[in-house]
Amino acid sequence: MSIRQIALVCVLAVLGLLAVACGDDASDESFKIGVMESLTGPGETYGTVSSQAKQLAVDEINAAGGIDGRMIELIVQDSKCSAQDAITAYNKLTDVDGVKIILGTSCSGAMLGAAPLAEADGVILFSGLATNPDIAHAGDYIFRTSMNDLQLGIDTGNVIRADGAQRLATITETTDYAEGVRRTTAEQFVSLGGEIVAEERYASDVTDFRSQLTKILNSNPDAVHIAAQSEFSGGTVVKQIRELGYEGPLYSEIVPVGATALEVAGESATGLKAVIAELDPANAKSQEVLTNFRARYDYVTLPWYLASGYDDVYITAECLKMTGDDQDADGFRDCMYGITWSGAIGENYSFDSDGEVVGLANAVVEVLPESERTADNNGYRILGSAPGADAAAAAPVMSQDPFRIGAMDALTGVGESYGNPILNAKLLAVEEINAAGGINGRMLEIIPEDSKCAAQDAITAYNKLTDVDGVKIILGTTCSGAMLGAAPLAEADGVIMLSASATSPDIKPAGDYIFRTAIDDNQLGVDTGNALHADGHHHLATITEATDYAEGARRTTVARFEELGGHVVAAESYTSDVTDFRTQLTKLIASEPDAIHLASQGEFSGGTIIKQARELGYEGPIYTEAVNTGPEALSIAGEAATGMKAIIPLGLTERGEQFLKDFDAHYGSPATQPWFQASAYDDVYLAAECLKQTNDDQDADGFRDCLYGLTFSGAIGANYTFDSDGEVVGPGNVVVQILPLAERNEDNLGYVSLGPAPTP
């Protein structure tokens, strides 16, 4: 440090801006520490972040007065993720700069290149990133906070096997790090009974991996393991293997889940699992480091390795404080062997007799869908600690066959306007699950049949799915009448039926294998009757489509309305093929009701009734349910629907709102029946959860028991369950009011929520 620099430091100290001793004890020489990181080459993304983290730590230490008043100076050399370049960098740092303590290198190959020289010369090499197992035997002056790939490989092999994979293919970059990861992973996987069916490698300068990936896919693996040195190649491998049609699970380590890798891979990375060293969110120091790093450099990538490089500087400062001499490598070495440290990457960790870090562990993470990746979550969710070998060995063998379940929805007929969107919601959920690696490594296949919103057609669809396709789990039906037609067969055969939209009260006692996330019309009727009463109505007229759903909605609404003192002054019904309702409506209006209740199965008839009632001069309030808030009904009714109130299921969760965005993006049109579509979307995820438990799409009894014991948080609610009748418990209804035509849009779906249904 120059005289001018010392003077400046002392002035700042006097002003209270630096805590530093100024006087005879302050040395004018800084501690000189070498740094060897891959600032260019295949490891530059993490070499750069590690170098920046080191500089951040040095600046903090110096700003706080340095080490006993002496500053730290980093002398940085580019090891380029290469053994030869690391040797060149080492010689420059030791022969020219005269350093005896070097922090680095980023890459295992570079570390293995320089380590023999350091050991022979008595120079400290201390890495926060190099993980190859061979480094453990490199010598008495070689240390690292990065965890040995032996543990990484053991953990990765355990995870792949625990997920049920039996046949593994690998693709590996030809570097010491990547090859070490592949070798230890494969050895652990094979030791647990797995088989390696294909091994492909690539050089670091390759950008097209389709030839190797095609060979891998031809081996018909259960899973693919990617060992990459650079984020660009790792992300590209992930992207290209999905482009070639592979839908199975992918596994890797830290590199392919870095920020650059995920940007390159895009949506293709969704569901990829990685075994990584992960910072503890509860560790205040790690969160402080990430916050300070982001504030300074405006990005964060590979957070654990960033923090590891940061900790290395503080450990170095502690040992320099003990020795007081940056040339005393022996004293520094002895300090390292005796130190116990708590920092950004963990608490109370130490180094064993091989210079290996002790006290840290790996986590398993899963990459999130692209829309859910943020700077805070780094693009993935933490699944927990890697499983042990015993759990992995006990895992079921992954089957090549998909889980097959049926779907029965009204794709034609009176319910088609909501049956088709409901099926599309199910198909979207299936695509998401498969893109994330399936269920225990197996894909999910859904077989749709048209139940046409009719009991007889539902029976025909049921017989096709069970007798021909052999399914034991059916999602559906859309309509209550169809559900009531097929449910007795399902109960007798021990086949699961799980409906998102069939609401008739008569479904409740249908049997032990019958479930629904749809809310029973008993509750709908209670809420509608309550709303009518709360609004001060005493004389009600009803018009009802002659279907199980509509009749159930009418019956329960009237029962509650009369229980509260109201009177039904007129009741009309119509068949589903009618298009002119003026005769029935004229009779209703003549009864001079306070309000009209409309229960329809089809949006066309519902919208037409609203329009014709207004054309006949009726100006009073109209009450209805979800069907007539659909886009077809509101389009037909036009301005006539303005002010109509409807009782519909409660608003969606954040996951539900995300589903609506994903549905719109996927299909190019918004969800027209958002709650019922979200309910159907949840049904697929519920099915996936129970299939994960049973691992058998023919085990209807196990699936049934799973549903009875399940607490689920999804698109339609948080922590909802099923009671002993298979009825959903948790979601509820709200009252909405139709907006004027000019104010309706895709975002508000044509209505405004007035809040939860009232209780008198």
Image: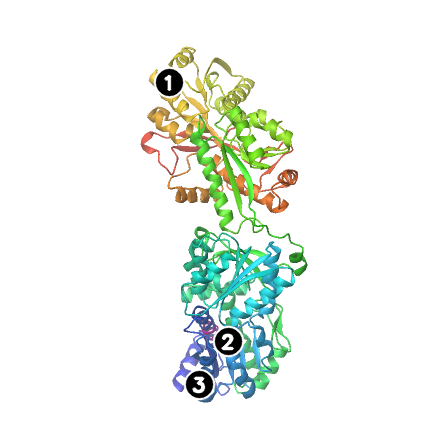
Q: Which mark is residue 92?
A: 3
Q: Nearer the viewer, mark 2 or mark 1?
A: 2
Instruction: Inspect the magenta stretch and tell me whether residue 57 lies in it.
Output: yes
Q: Is residue 336 above or below residue 403?
A: below
Give the side of residue 105 with respect to residue 643, left or right: right
| Secondary structure of residue under mark 2 | helix
Residue 76: x and y in percent read 43, 79
- Residue at screen point 55% across, 41% down: 404
Q: How many marks?
A: 3
Q: CA distance from mark 2 to mark 1?
A: 81 Å
Percent across and percent down for residue 368 are 49, 53
Q: Secondary structure at mark 1?
A: helix
User: Would you place residue 308 above or below residue 431 in this image?
Assistant: below
Residue occupying image coordinates x 54% and y 88%: 121
Residue under the image location 50 percent in, 36 percent down: 448
- The answer to which of 697 and 755 lies nearer the viewer is 697
User: Could one spot residue 195 in this view of the protein?
Assistant: yes
Which sits earlier in the primary sequence, circle 3 or circle 2? 3
Amino acid marked by disc 2: Gly
- Any mark on residue 109, and which? 2
Is residue 214 toward the left or the right of residue 335 in the image?
Answer: left
Which residues make up the magenta segment? 54-59
Q: Earlier in the sequence, mark 2 or mark 1?
A: 2
* Residue 754 visible from this viewpoint: no
The residue pinned by badge 1 equals 613
Magenta stretch: dominant secondary structure: helix
Secondary structure found at label 3: helix
Which tag is nearer the camera, tag 3 or tag 2? Answer: 2
